[in-house]
Image: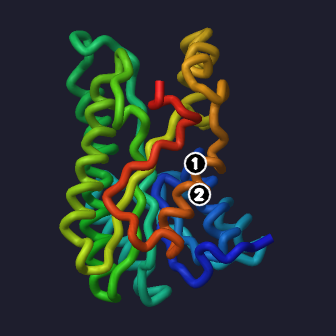
Amino acid sequence: MTSDLLTGKVVLVTGASSGIGEAAARVFAQEGATVVVTARREDRLAALVGALRDKGAEAAHVVGDVRVAEDVARAVDFVVAEYGRLDAAFNNAGIGGDRTPLHLMTDDVYDTVMDTNVRGVFNCLRHEIAAMLATGGGSIVNNSSVGGLVAIPTAAPYIASKHAVVGLTRAAADEYAKQGVRVNAIAPGTTRSEITLDWFGRNPGLQDLVNSLTPQGRTAEPEEIAQAAAWLLSDRCPFLTGTVMPVDGGFVNQ
């Protein structure tokens, strides 16, 4: 069943080949949006677009890597050329990195995490905002993490990168508020995805520990995070910009 939260909106979703990004594409389409998805794995993007079209949604995909500015520009240019404008964007692509004490962390892990999670969001913001300014504005949601609000042991590059996403969100929101571009972020708690399942698999007992620290006592489903992003992207919250919304079962309240 289609709702109307995003009816008429053209939305770009990055990191859409799995997890929260894939769920977001499905939720946004259910809410009436035209959805363009991008990620590095073309087979998964094509399957996702096929599934969305089978349910009557307008959808397309562009293969690309958010770390590469030209790839992001190509995705945004495709959206504008195909649909005439970019109304909204969910900058979801990101990685977790290794769980290692800071003094043992290698340069390549730090560089990979920061390049994906920070430069990737920066690349997306500058190209998306340019497109939105050309058509009168729009709404952007960046995917940060509870790790962008608090510290988590043995994950220094990830924590630094997600704090940086919060900073980019607030800076862009302040800079473009008067030009009709809203920029917000969500800060998900532990969410079921390929990354977290791998993380739990390599660290027995970790899921139970994390859930015990979450007042709701469980791991989120990707669709629950996507619903929050959909609301922030919609016209239901026109006076909301520069905020970072925890979607974490109460974790940061502890």
Q: Residue at x 60, y 54 (%)?
A: 22
Q: Amino acid at mark 2?
A: Ala
Label at residue 212: none
Q: Which of the two discs, 2 and 1, labels the residue nearer the N terminus?
A: 2
Left or right side of 182 for 43: right
Label at residue 24: 2
> Which residue, given by chain and number where applicable, does mark 1 sit on?
225
Q: Amino acid at mark 1?
A: Ile
* Disc 2 packing (10 Å; few <14; some 14–19; many ≥20): many
* Disc 1 packing (10 Å; few <14; some 14–19; many ≥20): many
Color scheme of the displayed model: rainbow
- Hey, which residue is sitting farthest right in the picture? 1
Of marks 2 and 1, the one in the foreground: 1
Q: Residue at x 25, y 11 (%)?
A: 104
How far across and down, in percent of the image, does residue 103 sit?
21, 11
Q: Is there CB contact under 8 Å for labels 2 and 1?
A: yes
